[in-house]
Amino acid sequence: MTTVTSYNPARPAEVLGEFPAADAAAVDRAVAAAAEAQRSWAKVPVPLRADIVAEAGRLLAERKDELATLVSREAGKVLVEGGGEVQEAIDMAAFVAGQGRSAMGQVVPSELRDKMAYTTRIPVGVVGMITPWNFPMAIPSWKCFPALLAGNGIVIKPSELAPVCGEAFVDVLAESGVPDGLIQVVHGAGDVGAALTTHPGIGAVSFTGSVPTGRKVAAAAMETGPRVVSLELGGKNAMIVLDDADLELATDGALFGAFGTSGQRCTSTSRVLVQRGVAAELVERVATRAAELTLGDPTDPTVDVGPIITRQSAERIAGMLDHAVGEGASVAGDSGICEVEGCDGGAFFHPTVLTGVRPEHRLAREEAFGPLLSVIEVDSDDEAVDVVNQVEYGLSAAVYTQDVNRALRAVDGIDTGICYVNAPTIGAEIPLPFGGTKHTGNGFREAGARGIEQFSQVKSVYIDYSGRLQRAQIDTE
Ligand code: UN1
Protein backbone atom coordinates (compact mmCIF):
# COMPACT_ATOMS: atom_id res chain seq x y z
CA MET A 1 0.00 0.00 0.00
CA THR A 2 1.56 3.32 -1.04
CA THR A 3 -1.45 5.52 -0.38
CA VAL A 4 -4.11 5.45 2.30
CA THR A 5 -7.42 6.63 0.91
CA SER A 6 -10.39 7.39 3.11
CA TYR A 7 -13.89 6.78 1.75
CA ASN A 8 -17.25 7.78 3.15
CA PRO A 9 -18.74 4.37 4.04
CA ALA A 10 -22.26 5.64 3.25
CA ARG A 11 -21.17 6.52 -0.32
CA PRO A 12 -17.81 4.92 -1.02
CA ALA A 13 -17.32 6.87 -4.26
CA GLU A 14 -16.80 9.94 -2.07
CA VAL A 15 -13.12 10.23 -1.12
CA LEU A 16 -12.51 12.12 2.13
CA GLY A 17 -8.74 12.22 2.10
CA GLU A 18 -5.59 10.64 0.82
CA PHE A 19 -2.28 10.25 2.63
CA PRO A 20 1.03 8.70 1.66
CA ALA A 21 1.55 5.40 3.44
CA ALA A 22 4.64 5.20 5.60
CA ASP A 23 7.45 2.75 4.90
CA ALA A 24 10.05 1.48 7.35
CA ALA A 25 12.25 4.55 6.76
CA ALA A 26 9.35 6.90 7.47
CA VAL A 27 8.58 5.06 10.71
CA ASP A 28 12.27 5.41 11.64
CA ARG A 29 12.17 9.14 11.03
CA ALA A 30 8.96 9.54 12.99
CA VAL A 31 10.33 7.67 16.01
CA ALA A 32 13.59 9.65 15.90
CA ALA A 33 11.79 13.00 15.71
CA ALA A 34 9.40 12.14 18.54
CA ALA A 35 12.32 10.92 20.66
CA GLU A 36 14.23 14.14 20.05
CA ALA A 37 11.27 16.33 21.08
CA GLN A 38 10.52 14.08 24.04
CA ARG A 39 13.84 14.87 25.71
CA SER A 40 12.79 18.47 26.41
CA TRP A 41 9.13 17.61 26.97
CA ALA A 42 10.08 15.29 29.83
CA LYS A 43 11.54 18.34 31.61
CA VAL A 44 8.35 20.41 31.35
CA PRO A 45 6.59 20.42 34.75
CA VAL A 46 3.56 18.12 34.76
CA PRO A 47 1.03 20.91 35.53
CA LEU A 48 2.26 22.80 32.45
CA ARG A 49 1.87 19.71 30.29
CA ALA A 50 -1.63 19.45 31.75
CA ASP A 51 -2.40 23.02 30.67
CA ILE A 52 -1.78 22.01 27.05
CA VAL A 53 -4.13 19.04 27.43
CA ALA A 54 -6.75 21.40 28.89
CA GLU A 55 -6.33 23.70 25.90
CA ALA A 56 -6.85 20.72 23.57
CA GLY A 57 -10.11 20.01 25.39
CA ARG A 58 -11.19 23.61 24.91
CA LEU A 59 -10.43 23.49 21.17
CA LEU A 60 -12.27 20.19 20.80
CA ALA A 61 -15.31 21.73 22.49
CA GLU A 62 -15.16 24.76 20.21
CA ARG A 63 -15.09 22.48 17.14
CA LYS A 64 -17.40 19.81 18.46
CA ASP A 65 -20.03 20.09 15.71
CA GLU A 66 -17.52 20.19 12.88
CA LEU A 67 -15.58 17.21 14.27
CA ALA A 68 -18.78 15.27 14.99
CA THR A 69 -19.75 15.64 11.35
CA LEU A 70 -16.33 14.45 10.28
CA VAL A 71 -16.63 11.36 12.52
CA SER A 72 -20.08 10.78 11.06
CA ARG A 73 -18.80 10.99 7.49
CA GLU A 74 -15.69 8.92 7.93
CA ALA A 75 -16.77 6.31 10.50
CA GLY A 76 -20.45 6.14 9.51
CA LYS A 77 -21.78 7.00 12.97
CA VAL A 78 -25.04 8.88 13.30
CA LEU A 79 -24.51 12.53 14.20
CA VAL A 80 -25.49 12.31 17.86
CA GLU A 81 -22.99 9.51 18.31
CA GLY A 82 -20.34 11.52 16.48
CA GLY A 83 -21.01 14.31 18.98
CA GLY A 84 -20.85 11.84 21.87
CA GLU A 85 -17.51 10.62 20.63
CA VAL A 86 -16.01 14.13 20.49
CA GLN A 87 -17.47 14.77 23.95
CA GLU A 88 -15.68 11.67 25.20
CA ALA A 89 -12.39 13.22 24.03
CA ILE A 90 -13.33 16.53 25.70
CA ASP A 91 -14.10 14.68 28.95
CA MET A 92 -10.80 12.84 28.73
CA ALA A 93 -8.93 16.13 28.33
CA ALA A 94 -10.65 17.55 31.44
CA PHE A 95 -9.93 14.41 33.42
CA VAL A 96 -6.26 14.18 32.42
CA ALA A 97 -5.69 17.92 32.87
CA GLY A 98 -6.93 17.51 36.45
CA GLN A 99 -4.54 14.62 36.98
CA GLY A 100 -1.70 17.02 36.21
CA ARG A 101 -2.32 18.72 39.51
CA SER A 102 -3.10 15.58 41.50
CA ALA A 103 -1.04 13.03 43.39
CA MET A 104 1.03 10.80 41.12
CA GLY A 105 2.55 8.54 43.68
CA GLN A 106 2.58 7.54 47.28
CA VAL A 107 4.66 8.48 50.27
CA VAL A 108 5.20 5.58 52.64
CA PRO A 109 6.82 5.61 56.09
CA SER A 110 10.37 4.30 56.10
CA GLU A 111 11.34 1.65 58.61
CA LEU A 112 14.43 3.75 59.42
CA ARG A 113 14.78 7.10 61.18
CA ASP A 114 15.44 10.25 59.17
CA LYS A 115 14.55 8.60 55.91
CA MET A 116 11.68 9.00 53.52
CA ALA A 117 10.29 6.80 50.78
CA TYR A 118 7.99 7.75 47.94
CA THR A 119 7.08 6.85 44.37
CA THR A 120 6.88 9.01 41.30
CA ARG A 121 6.01 8.40 37.65
CA ILE A 122 8.52 8.61 34.83
CA PRO A 123 7.92 8.59 31.06
CA VAL A 124 8.50 5.50 28.94
CA GLY A 125 9.95 7.56 26.06
CA VAL A 126 8.10 7.28 22.77
CA VAL A 127 4.75 5.49 22.73
CA GLY A 128 3.65 3.69 19.57
CA MET A 129 -0.13 3.74 19.24
CA ILE A 130 -2.39 1.82 16.91
CA THR A 131 -5.97 3.02 17.03
CA PRO A 132 -9.18 1.67 15.46
CA TRP A 133 -11.62 3.32 13.07
CA ASN A 134 -14.71 2.97 15.26
CA PHE A 135 -13.72 5.63 17.82
CA PRO A 136 -11.35 7.69 15.69
CA MET A 137 -11.27 10.66 18.09
CA ALA A 138 -12.11 9.21 21.50
CA ILE A 139 -9.63 6.33 21.48
CA PRO A 140 -6.70 8.51 20.32
CA SER A 141 -7.67 10.88 23.16
CA TRP A 142 -7.64 8.04 25.72
CA LYS A 143 -4.11 7.26 24.64
CA CYS A 144 -2.58 10.62 23.68
CA PHE A 145 -3.66 12.75 26.64
CA PRO A 146 -2.29 10.52 29.40
CA ALA A 147 0.81 9.70 27.33
CA LEU A 148 1.55 13.42 26.95
CA LEU A 149 0.87 14.13 30.59
CA ALA A 150 3.34 11.40 31.51
CA GLY A 151 6.04 13.16 29.46
CA ASN A 152 6.20 10.95 26.38
CA GLY A 153 6.55 11.44 22.66
CA ILE A 154 4.00 9.73 20.43
CA VAL A 155 3.92 7.99 17.07
CA ILE A 156 0.33 7.17 16.23
CA LYS A 157 -1.00 5.05 13.40
CA PRO A 158 -4.69 5.76 13.02
CA SER A 159 -6.77 3.10 11.31
CA GLU A 160 -6.40 3.17 7.54
CA LEU A 161 -10.20 3.42 7.50
CA ALA A 162 -10.28 6.68 9.47
CA PRO A 163 -7.07 8.60 8.74
CA VAL A 164 -8.80 11.99 8.33
CA CYS A 165 -10.19 11.89 11.87
CA GLY A 166 -6.76 10.85 13.14
CA GLU A 167 -5.13 13.84 11.43
CA ALA A 168 -7.86 16.20 12.67
CA PHE A 169 -7.32 15.07 16.25
CA VAL A 170 -3.54 15.50 16.02
CA ASP A 171 -4.01 18.95 14.44
CA VAL A 172 -5.96 20.00 17.53
CA LEU A 173 -3.09 18.87 19.72
CA ALA A 174 -0.56 20.78 17.64
CA GLU A 175 -2.67 23.94 17.92
CA SER A 176 -2.99 23.47 21.66
CA GLY A 177 0.73 23.93 22.13
CA VAL A 178 2.16 20.43 21.94
CA PRO A 179 5.77 21.07 20.88
CA ASP A 180 6.78 20.46 17.27
CA GLY A 181 7.78 16.92 16.51
CA LEU A 182 6.45 15.42 19.74
CA ILE A 183 3.49 13.75 18.02
CA GLN A 184 4.03 12.01 14.73
CA VAL A 185 1.35 10.42 12.58
CA VAL A 186 2.13 7.49 10.30
CA HIS A 187 -0.45 6.06 7.94
CA GLY A 188 -0.82 2.57 6.61
CA ALA A 189 -2.06 -0.92 7.28
CA GLY A 190 -0.73 -3.78 9.38
CA ASP A 191 2.79 -3.66 7.96
CA VAL A 192 3.22 -0.08 9.21
CA GLY A 193 1.75 -1.07 12.58
CA ALA A 194 4.27 -3.91 12.75
CA ALA A 195 7.20 -1.61 11.85
CA LEU A 196 6.08 0.77 14.57
CA THR A 197 5.48 -1.72 17.37
CA THR A 198 8.75 -3.56 16.79
CA HIS A 199 10.83 -0.40 16.46
CA PRO A 200 13.63 -0.42 19.04
CA GLY A 201 13.07 3.27 19.79
CA ILE A 202 9.57 2.68 21.15
CA GLY A 203 9.18 2.41 24.94
CA ALA A 204 5.53 1.38 25.00
CA VAL A 205 2.93 0.08 22.61
CA SER A 206 -0.76 0.77 23.03
CA PHE A 207 -3.11 -1.15 20.77
CA THR A 208 -6.89 -1.23 20.43
CA GLY A 209 -8.38 -3.69 17.95
CA SER A 210 -9.15 -7.34 17.44
CA VAL A 211 -7.89 -10.28 19.49
CA PRO A 212 -5.89 -11.94 16.66
CA THR A 213 -4.11 -8.69 15.75
CA GLY A 214 -3.57 -7.83 19.42
CA ARG A 215 -1.86 -11.17 19.98
CA LYS A 216 0.44 -10.59 17.01
CA VAL A 217 1.25 -7.06 18.15
CA ALA A 218 2.13 -8.20 21.66
CA ALA A 219 4.31 -11.09 20.49
CA ALA A 220 6.15 -8.99 17.90
CA ALA A 221 6.63 -6.07 20.29
CA MET A 222 8.26 -8.27 22.92
CA GLU A 223 10.60 -9.91 20.41
CA THR A 224 12.52 -6.70 19.82
CA GLY A 225 12.85 -5.71 23.43
CA PRO A 226 10.97 -5.57 26.68
CA ARG A 227 8.49 -2.75 26.74
CA VAL A 228 5.09 -1.89 28.09
CA VAL A 229 2.42 -3.38 25.82
CA SER A 230 -1.20 -2.57 26.56
CA LEU A 231 -4.02 -4.20 24.66
CA GLU A 232 -7.71 -3.41 24.42
CA LEU A 233 -9.34 -6.13 22.34
CA GLY A 234 -12.75 -7.49 21.52
CA GLY A 235 -15.94 -8.28 23.36
CA LYS A 236 -18.90 -10.63 23.27
CA ASN A 237 -20.96 -8.51 25.58
CA ALA A 238 -24.12 -9.82 27.16
CA MET A 239 -27.18 -8.26 28.66
CA ILE A 240 -29.10 -10.35 31.19
CA VAL A 241 -32.83 -9.72 31.40
CA LEU A 242 -34.34 -11.32 34.49
CA ASP A 243 -38.03 -12.09 34.75
CA ASP A 244 -38.83 -9.07 36.97
CA ALA A 245 -37.10 -6.56 34.67
CA ASP A 246 -38.80 -3.44 33.33
CA LEU A 247 -39.13 -4.78 29.78
CA GLU A 248 -39.52 -1.39 28.18
CA LEU A 249 -36.28 -0.23 29.74
CA ALA A 250 -34.59 -3.49 28.73
CA THR A 251 -35.85 -3.04 25.16
CA ASP A 252 -34.43 0.50 24.99
CA GLY A 253 -31.14 -0.82 26.36
CA ALA A 254 -30.98 -3.73 23.90
CA LEU A 255 -31.65 -1.48 20.91
CA PHE A 256 -29.06 1.13 21.82
CA GLY A 257 -26.54 -1.45 22.99
CA ALA A 258 -26.87 -3.75 19.97
CA PHE A 259 -27.62 -1.39 17.11
CA GLY A 260 -25.97 1.87 18.18
CA THR A 261 -22.88 2.43 15.97
CA SER A 262 -24.42 -0.38 13.84
CA GLY A 263 -23.15 -2.83 16.44
CA GLN A 264 -19.55 -1.87 15.68
CA ARG A 265 -18.34 -1.03 19.18
CA CYS A 266 -16.16 -3.34 21.18
CA THR A 267 -18.78 -2.81 23.90
CA SER A 268 -21.80 -3.56 21.67
CA THR A 269 -24.43 -5.88 23.09
CA SER A 270 -24.32 -9.06 21.05
CA ARG A 271 -26.13 -11.44 23.39
CA VAL A 272 -29.33 -11.07 25.37
CA LEU A 273 -29.69 -13.74 28.03
CA VAL A 274 -33.33 -13.64 28.92
CA GLN A 275 -35.24 -15.62 31.49
CA ARG A 276 -37.63 -17.98 29.76
CA GLY A 277 -40.87 -16.54 31.17
CA VAL A 278 -40.34 -13.12 29.58
CA ALA A 279 -38.38 -14.19 26.49
CA ALA A 280 -41.25 -14.15 23.98
CA GLU A 281 -42.40 -10.70 25.05
CA LEU A 282 -38.91 -9.24 24.99
CA VAL A 283 -38.16 -10.66 21.53
CA GLU A 284 -41.43 -9.27 20.23
CA ARG A 285 -40.68 -5.80 21.59
CA VAL A 286 -37.05 -5.72 20.41
CA ALA A 287 -37.85 -7.08 16.93
CA THR A 288 -40.73 -4.62 16.45
CA ARG A 289 -38.64 -1.65 17.46
CA ALA A 290 -35.62 -2.84 15.42
CA ALA A 291 -37.81 -2.92 12.31
CA GLU A 292 -38.73 0.73 12.92
CA LEU A 293 -35.14 1.98 12.88
CA THR A 294 -34.26 4.13 9.87
CA LEU A 295 -31.10 3.21 8.00
CA GLY A 296 -29.34 5.84 5.94
CA ASP A 297 -26.77 8.60 5.62
CA PRO A 298 -25.55 9.06 9.21
CA THR A 299 -25.21 12.84 8.79
CA ASP A 300 -28.99 13.03 8.30
CA PRO A 301 -30.37 13.74 11.80
CA THR A 302 -33.47 11.60 11.16
CA VAL A 303 -31.38 8.47 10.57
CA ASP A 304 -30.98 5.91 13.41
CA VAL A 305 -28.44 3.51 11.95
CA GLY A 306 -25.54 4.27 9.61
CA PRO A 307 -23.59 1.97 7.27
CA ILE A 308 -21.16 -0.83 8.01
CA ILE A 309 -17.63 0.46 7.65
CA THR A 310 -16.82 -1.53 4.49
CA ARG A 311 -18.64 -3.95 2.21
CA GLN A 312 -16.08 -6.59 3.10
CA SER A 313 -16.96 -6.19 6.74
CA ALA A 314 -20.70 -6.37 5.95
CA GLU A 315 -20.08 -9.60 4.05
CA ARG A 316 -18.20 -11.07 6.98
CA ILE A 317 -21.16 -10.22 9.26
CA ALA A 318 -23.57 -11.75 6.72
CA GLY A 319 -21.44 -14.91 6.75
CA MET A 320 -21.76 -15.17 10.52
CA LEU A 321 -25.51 -14.69 10.23
CA ASP A 322 -25.82 -17.46 7.63
CA HIS A 323 -23.73 -19.75 9.77
CA ALA A 324 -25.98 -19.08 12.79
CA VAL A 325 -29.08 -19.90 10.76
CA GLY A 326 -27.33 -23.07 9.60
CA GLU A 327 -26.78 -23.99 13.26
CA GLY A 328 -30.50 -23.65 13.97
CA ALA A 329 -31.05 -19.98 14.85
CA SER A 330 -34.08 -18.13 13.45
CA VAL A 331 -34.30 -14.51 12.42
CA ALA A 332 -37.08 -12.42 13.98
CA GLY A 333 -37.74 -9.72 11.35
CA ASP A 334 -35.45 -8.20 8.73
CA SER A 335 -31.84 -9.22 8.44
CA GLY A 336 -28.78 -9.02 6.26
CA ILE A 337 -27.13 -6.53 3.92
CA CYS A 338 -29.36 -3.95 2.27
CA GLU A 339 -29.01 -0.90 0.07
CA VAL A 340 -30.31 2.56 0.90
CA GLU A 341 -31.53 5.11 -1.61
CA GLY A 342 -29.17 8.05 -2.01
CA CYS A 343 -26.28 6.07 -0.53
CA ASP A 344 -24.83 4.42 -3.61
CA GLY A 345 -22.50 1.57 -2.85
CA GLY A 346 -22.85 1.92 0.93
CA ALA A 347 -23.20 -1.44 2.69
CA PHE A 348 -26.02 -1.21 5.20
CA PHE A 349 -27.14 -4.05 7.43
CA HIS A 350 -30.56 -4.56 8.95
CA PRO A 351 -30.52 -4.55 12.72
CA THR A 352 -30.98 -8.29 13.15
CA VAL A 353 -32.51 -10.19 16.07
CA LEU A 354 -31.85 -13.93 16.25
CA THR A 355 -33.69 -16.39 18.43
CA GLY A 356 -32.96 -20.02 19.17
CA VAL A 357 -29.26 -19.29 19.61
CA ARG A 358 -27.54 -21.63 22.02
CA PRO A 359 -24.41 -20.82 24.04
CA GLU A 360 -22.33 -23.31 22.06
CA HIS A 361 -23.20 -21.75 18.68
CA ARG A 362 -20.43 -19.84 16.96
CA LEU A 363 -22.43 -16.60 16.98
CA ALA A 364 -22.83 -16.87 20.74
CA ARG A 365 -19.07 -17.08 21.21
CA GLU A 366 -17.36 -15.05 18.46
CA GLU A 367 -17.40 -11.30 18.04
CA ALA A 368 -19.45 -10.25 14.99
CA PHE A 369 -18.71 -6.52 15.19
CA GLY A 370 -22.02 -5.81 13.51
CA PRO A 371 -25.75 -5.48 14.27
CA LEU A 372 -26.48 -9.12 15.16
CA LEU A 373 -28.26 -9.62 18.47
CA SER A 374 -28.55 -13.23 19.64
CA VAL A 375 -31.28 -14.04 22.12
CA ILE A 376 -30.44 -16.94 24.39
CA GLU A 377 -33.03 -18.25 26.84
CA VAL A 378 -31.97 -19.17 30.35
CA ASP A 379 -33.83 -20.61 33.32
CA SER A 380 -32.21 -18.95 36.32
CA ASP A 381 -30.05 -16.06 37.49
CA ASP A 382 -27.13 -18.43 38.03
CA GLU A 383 -27.43 -19.90 34.56
CA ALA A 384 -27.47 -16.40 33.07
CA VAL A 385 -24.24 -15.51 34.85
CA ASP A 386 -22.66 -18.79 33.76
CA VAL A 387 -23.52 -18.10 30.13
CA VAL A 388 -22.16 -14.52 30.34
CA ASN A 389 -18.88 -16.02 31.52
CA GLN A 390 -18.70 -18.87 29.00
CA VAL A 391 -16.98 -16.80 26.31
CA GLU A 392 -13.28 -16.00 26.01
CA TYR A 393 -13.97 -12.25 26.19
CA GLY A 394 -14.66 -10.18 29.31
CA LEU A 395 -15.31 -6.58 28.38
CA SER A 396 -18.78 -5.43 29.33
CA ALA A 397 -22.06 -6.88 30.64
CA ALA A 398 -25.42 -5.62 31.87
CA VAL A 399 -28.14 -6.98 34.10
CA TYR A 400 -31.74 -5.81 34.05
CA THR A 401 -33.83 -6.50 37.15
CA GLN A 402 -35.78 -4.45 39.70
CA ASP A 403 -34.47 -6.47 42.61
CA VAL A 404 -31.28 -5.07 44.10
CA ASN A 405 -30.29 -8.43 45.57
CA ARG A 406 -30.50 -10.21 42.24
CA ALA A 407 -28.65 -7.34 40.56
CA LEU A 408 -25.75 -7.32 42.95
CA ARG A 409 -25.40 -11.10 43.01
CA ALA A 410 -25.15 -11.00 39.21
CA VAL A 411 -22.60 -8.17 39.33
CA ASP A 412 -20.51 -10.25 41.74
CA GLY A 413 -20.67 -13.32 39.51
CA ILE A 414 -20.00 -11.67 36.16
CA ASP A 415 -16.40 -11.86 34.96
CA THR A 416 -16.02 -8.67 32.91
CA GLY A 417 -14.09 -5.43 33.31
CA ILE A 418 -17.24 -3.31 33.07
CA CYS A 419 -20.68 -4.12 34.46
CA TYR A 420 -23.96 -2.21 34.25
CA VAL A 421 -27.22 -2.51 36.16
CA ASN A 422 -30.32 -1.40 34.24
CA ALA A 423 -28.19 0.31 31.58
CA PRO A 424 -26.81 -1.00 28.27
CA THR A 425 -23.36 -2.49 27.75
CA ILE A 426 -22.15 0.60 25.86
CA GLY A 427 -21.52 4.07 27.19
CA ALA A 428 -18.62 3.86 29.63
CA GLU A 429 -17.66 7.17 31.22
CA ILE A 430 -14.15 8.57 31.46
CA PRO A 431 -13.45 8.67 35.22
CA LEU A 432 -13.76 4.90 35.62
CA PRO A 433 -11.25 2.47 34.12
CA PHE A 434 -12.14 1.02 30.71
CA GLY A 435 -11.07 -2.47 29.71
CA GLY A 436 -11.78 -6.13 30.10
CA THR A 437 -10.81 -9.41 31.66
CA LYS A 438 -9.70 -12.65 29.97
CA HIS A 439 -8.79 -12.34 26.27
CA THR A 440 -10.21 -8.81 26.04
CA GLY A 441 -6.97 -7.32 27.26
CA ASN A 442 -3.79 -7.85 29.17
CA GLY A 443 -4.72 -6.28 32.46
CA PHE A 444 -4.25 -2.61 31.62
CA ARG A 445 -7.12 -0.19 31.74
CA GLU A 446 -7.62 3.00 29.76
CA ALA A 447 -9.16 6.18 31.23
CA GLY A 448 -9.81 6.29 34.97
CA ALA A 449 -7.28 7.22 37.60
CA ARG A 450 -4.85 4.48 36.60
CA GLY A 451 -5.08 5.00 32.84
CA ILE A 452 -1.72 6.71 32.97
CA GLU A 453 -0.02 3.48 34.01
CA GLN A 454 0.29 2.15 30.48
CA PHE A 455 2.27 5.24 29.51
CA SER A 456 4.59 5.62 32.47
CA GLN A 457 6.73 3.64 34.79
CA VAL A 458 6.94 3.94 38.50
CA LYS A 459 10.15 5.01 40.23
CA SER A 460 10.68 4.35 43.94
CA VAL A 461 12.81 6.98 45.69
CA TYR A 462 14.48 6.69 49.11
CA ILE A 463 16.01 9.74 50.77
CA ASP A 464 18.17 9.23 53.81
CA TYR A 465 18.78 12.45 55.74
CA SER A 466 20.40 10.83 58.80
CA GLY A 467 23.95 11.51 57.62
CA ARG A 468 25.08 7.96 58.35
CA LEU A 469 24.80 4.55 56.75
CA GLN A 470 21.50 2.96 57.71
CA ARG A 471 20.94 -0.59 56.56
CA ALA A 472 17.37 -1.49 55.67
CA GLN A 473 16.10 -4.70 57.27
CA ILE A 474 19.16 -4.69 59.61
CA ASP A 475 19.42 -1.38 61.53
CA THR A 476 15.75 -1.31 62.38
CA GLU A 477 15.80 -1.22 66.18
C1 UN1 B 1 -14.91 0.86 21.72
O1 UN1 B 1 -15.90 0.39 21.19
O2 UN1 B 1 -13.79 0.51 21.34
O3 UN1 B 1 -18.35 2.43 26.36
C2 UN1 B 1 -14.95 1.91 22.78
C3 UN1 B 1 -18.49 2.77 25.17
C4 UN1 B 1 -17.66 3.90 24.64
C5 UN1 B 1 -16.32 3.43 24.21
C6 UN1 B 1 -16.32 2.25 23.30
N1 UN1 B 1 -17.55 4.89 25.67
O4 UN1 B 1 -19.29 2.22 24.44
Image (cartoon, rainbow, N blue to C red):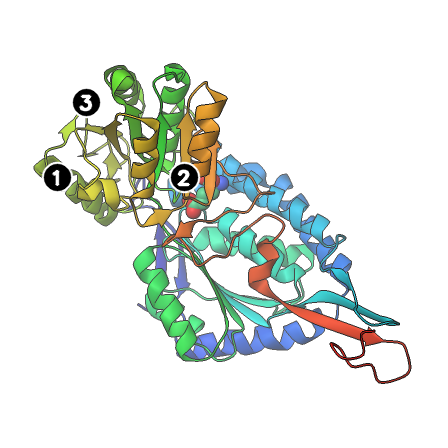
Figure check: 26 above or below 468: above
Foreground residue among 110 and 371: 110
Residue 472 vs residue 456: left or right? right
The residue labelled by disc 2 is 414
Foreground residue among 12 and 359: 359
Task: Estimate the x, y position of residue 301 in percent, counting from the top left.
Answer: 43, 26
Identify the disc placed on residue 217.
none
For label 1, count other residues whose C-alpha is less than 10 Å away and answer few (under 14), some (14-19) or many (20+): some
The residue labelled by disc 3 is 333
The tag earlier along the polypeptide, 1 or 2, is 1
User: Which residue type does callout 1 highlight?
Assistant: Asp
Figure check: 284 above or below 171: above
Residue at x-position 45% and y-position 31%: 409
Distance from Cα at disc 3 to Cα at disc 2: 31 Å
Task: Estimate the x, y position of residue 289 in percent, counting from the top left.
Answer: 31, 18
User: Which residue type does callout 3 highlight?
Assistant: Gly
User: Which residue type does callout 2 highlight?
Assistant: Ile
Quarter holding residue 77: top left
Figure check: 72 above or below 170: above
The residue labelled by disc 1 is 322
Figure check: 160 above or below 124: above
Report whether residue 399 is seen.
yes
Distance from Cα at disc 1 to Cα at disc 3: 15 Å
Residue at x-position 30% and y-position 30%: 272
**SS class, disc 2:** loop
Task: Estimate the x, y position of residue 37 in percent, counting from the top left.
Answer: 65, 73
Label pair 3/2, CB-CB below 8 angstroms: no
For label 2, count other residues whose C-alpha is less than 10 Å away and answer few (under 14), some (14-19) or many (20+): many
**SS class, disc 1:** helix
Distance from Cα at disc 1 to Cα at disc 2: 30 Å
